[in-house]
Amino acid sequence: MAKKPTSIGDRSFGTLEEAKEAVRHVVSAYVDGAVVTAPEHIELLTDLVYMHRDPPRKVGDGIDHFIIDHVPGTPNRGFKVVQVGGASDFFSWKKIIDAPPTTRTRVTKALVNAGRPITDRFREEAFASGAPVPCAATGELIYAKTDAVARHHAPPLRELAAVFVAEHGGWEAIEVVDTDGSLPGQMPSDPAIVLAWREWQERNIGGLRIELSPRRGA
């Protein structure tokens, strides 16, 4: 069976299992009842929640924090989303990764592809001197640019995309199509949307940073 690439926000994975392993790493980093504290873990889980078929129900007025705990009625450990105001709910991260992508997820992935000229250029410039570059999330030195990715951090991609999409008619208004093969996945079908997104990214380029790729060594 062919491997199925996937992504969580703007993190690319070669297979569904690679994506699940990244989430398992977060689970194993905390004891039951612990609040998730590492910023990179919070970002990963927040992006996962927005891949849910009904993000507003999980997010409410905003996410206050995440808790690692056993899922009621199962032997599994998982994540509880605690909303601003105190309401909380578990979410099945495995089902989210395995499920067919929502419209929001498909459009987000297409925008990531459309923006690769900007993120790739940012990465090239970061490594231009030949010196290793510290991962902005962990501090680990990255020696090869192929082990690095440029990711939006302030604001994160999901917020950049939400503002952009709202100004262009909403998630359902942006059609996506398969690429010509030069990139995996899909792109917005409208060249004007691609151009507008790249211009939007350029205006927010100060929020990009270099991090270790989740696929390093793959």
Image (cartoon, rainbow, N blue to C red):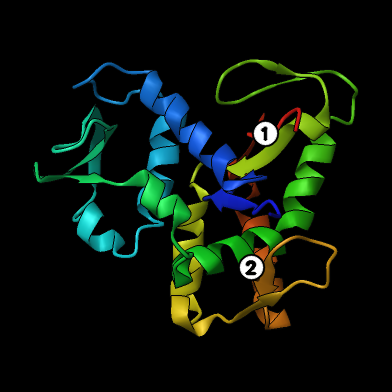
Residue drawn at 68 percent across, 83 percent down: 190
Residue at screen point 81% across, 31% down: 145
Image height of 117 relative to 164, above or below: above
Taking 152 as reference, is 212 above or below it? above
Query: Residue tagged by mark 1?
Result: 213
Give above or below for 122 relative to 165: above
Residue placed farthest to the front in the image?
1
Where does label 2 land, which residue?
A: 197
Picture coordinates of residue 173 (x, y %)? 49, 84
For label 2, the SS is helix
Q: Quadrant of the N terminus?
A: bottom right
Residue 99 in the image, given as x and y percentages of width and height:
43, 60
For disc 2, the neighbor class at 10 Å (few under 14, some 14 to 19, many from 20) is many
Q: Earlier in the sequence, mark 1 or mark 2?
A: 2
Residue kind at label 2, given as amino acid type? Trp
Residue at 54 percent of width and 62 percent of height: 108
In x, y percent, where is residue 216? 72, 30
* 147 vs 17, nearest the viewer: 17
From the viewer's perspective, is 139 left or right of 72? right
* Residue at (46, 72) in percent of width and height: 103
196 left or right of 218 in image = left
Residue 90 shows which numbered tag? none
Q: Are marks 1 and 2 in contact (CB under 8 Å)?
A: no
Q: Amino acid at mark 1?
A: Ser
